Image (tube, rainbow, N blue to C red):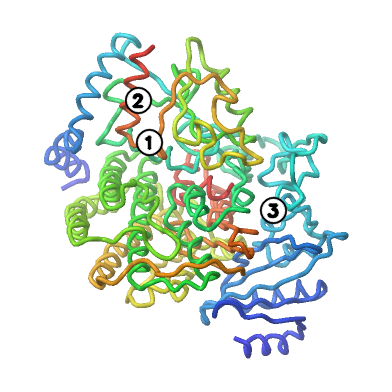
Amino acid sequence: MEKFLTDLETNYKLKSIKQLKNHDNEFYVEVAAAQFNAYCLALHKTFISTVMTMFAEEQKDHFIIYCGFAAEKMAAWIFVVLKVDKNKPEFPSIARQIYAANLFEREMREMFGLEPTGNPDGRRLRLHDEVWPEGNFPLRKDFGKEKDKALGEYRFSKVDGEGIFEVPVGPVHAGIIGPGHFRFSVAGEPIINLEIRLGFTHRGIEKLLEGKTVNEAVKLSEAVSGVSSVAHSWAFCQAAEKICGIKVPRSANYTRAIYLELERMYNHLAAIGGIALDVGFSQPAALAAIIKEALHQLNEKLTGSRFLKGTNVIGGAAKKISSEEEKLIWGTFSSLAKDFAELKEMLSGSVSFLDRVDTTGWLRKKSAEDFGVLGLSGRASGINFDLRQGFMPPYDDLDFKIATATTGDVLARLNLRLEEFAASISIIKKLLNSLSAETILAAKIENRAGFGLGVVEGARGPVLYWVSLNKSGKIERCKIVDPSFRSWQGLSYAVLDNIIPDFPVCNKSFDLSYAGNDL
Amino acid sequence: MSTLDKLITNCLRRGIVTRSIEAKEYELLGAELKGLINRRFARSFNIREVDTGSCGACEAEIIAANNPLYDISRFGVNFVASPRHADALLVTGPVSKNMVLALKKTYEAMPEPKFVISCGDCAFDGGVFLNSYYVEGGISKVLPVAFHIPGCPPTPLEIIKKLLTVLNKL
């Protein structure tokens, strides 16, 4: 890696101030403000990876900005680090060159008051202008009570022209679903612009995590997105374990991976059923719900929680999978295999259904790359990136293929979900076969100061936790990135030229999390 | 065989799936609930659901209560798309500041008589999100709450159990 960075610097005529290696696979490169832009761009050009995470941290006398990239061939992470003076809280924006950084920059602006100079969009994401006065930066260390100042109003981008009208939807929707505001501009039937305003479920989790011990924080990480509780808590535990120097036993990682795949399975079924339901094909939707319920009941029997909460603890897994439980898993899988085959046949056998999903909600590869759409929706558009390839230890032992597609429409995402569902079954089978009797909990756990990154490929895509602990083992800063954060923008592009009645099916094919996005 | 033929034969082969739930208690509770709704709500009890910042698990469980196995609507409990059609408001989440106005407006849009049920531990007092700068800390801080369904998240069985006691008390 050191050689790679030297080569990169000579090729692109770059200069770094300091390089630091952290926990085997994290590299931090500190650069001067004038070099920040060019360095990020060089890394962005080198890897498939987009800006995976970008966040700020407050120190005593300065802010630090981190911009993280995944070096997929080397299975490593590179962070470009920039120190910002507190008296002049601004940094050069990279959003004009790397659009995927845009939301992260806006996030830093509202949370820390760090101005990304050159970023064209100064609007806030989560702290809505109507309820939160300007000039209150919750993630700053000196933030106490909110200061009374004037409230503002959010400006939606406007499309003008003859016959164009706006359709506002939300935040309270017709179904049983999270809140978000969708502003459609339509000319006749086709959508010509969609602006998604989110943040309605913002709960201030990153601030809440500060000052908590790692053990206390696991429960909170499960509540970031309730239907991805395993992915989130595993990513958090991974980061904390790295910092504390805990070596997680092999069996613990296997057990965690089994739960993660179970989580992926029920999430995919929710989306598959939703896609069928949103075009009015209710029988497969009902069948998907039946299979999904069987999985929730299995989860409850295995862990006591239908959503697999409480399975991850710092140092390993909370509970061993016993041989009776293993039989239970086999039994459930064999009984749902027939239902699943039937579901697949129903979906692929109906011409009118395929007509509704084929070429609908088309997300081009270029758009997906620009927005940084990864995970399942990214793979459906031809971005071959999955953290399970190389970045997550238990999967290295397994021989499995990541499913990809190229068309990027609703059908592609549907087919990928069907494929991944089947793949998860075979992954779980392999993991169960190689589970051994060894312990699932690391023996000694001691607190250490430091920082580290935890990564997990959840059902929706990469979940990233960057954690910094102080000397007493409390959290100083925790940055959470849920895949939905970037993918929502992909959705707003995928629906263009489609008609509003097709929006629900496009939305469901992405199946994004409101809670994970809003934090 | 055409798709339609397949669907029909599948339905016949599968039979009524609602009976296959392991908890027999559910059917008994449901029958009681149905009787109650028949008497007090002229056979249909309509609920409008609002998420004010939950993690999404409560929504998933409320959806599960509507799946073909639990199928809560056969007892007369319907989840409706508009607050104008609702008898009760079912609210999840600790109430993010961003949702206060939308929640109040939804409540105001409901016709009288009406009442509010909070659902999930964080809807009660903020739960794990208590003391955050951005949450109000429970539905009762914003609206008069008549009943609460505890759980993180409450299972479909717990939801129906609590609904039964709720309607009994009215």
Labels 3 and 2 positioned on one and the same chain:
no
- A213 on left or right of A314: right
The disc, 1 or 2, on the residue closer to the chain's N-terminal end is 1
Task: Quadrant for residue B46, please give it.
Answer: top left
Q: Which residue is mark 1?
A: B154
Query: What is the chain identity of the residue bearing mark 3?
Result: A
The picture places residue B152, in percent across and down from the top left corner, at 42, 40
Q: How many marks?
A: 3
Residue at (84% x, 60% y) in the render:
A86
Residue at (42% x, 74% y) in the render:
A393
Q: Which residue is mark 2?
A: B162
Pointer 1 and pointer 2: residues touching (CB < 8 Å)? yes
**Three-letter code, disc 1:** Pro
Q: Is residue A42 visible?
A: yes
Q: Which residue is mark 3?
A: A107
Quadrant placement of the N terminus of chain A: bottom right
- A21 on left or right of A429: right
**Three-letter code, disc 2:** Lys
The picture places residue A54, in percent across and down from the top left corner, at 66, 63
**Three-letter code, disc 3:** Glu
Query: What is the chain identity of the residue bearing mark 2?
Result: B
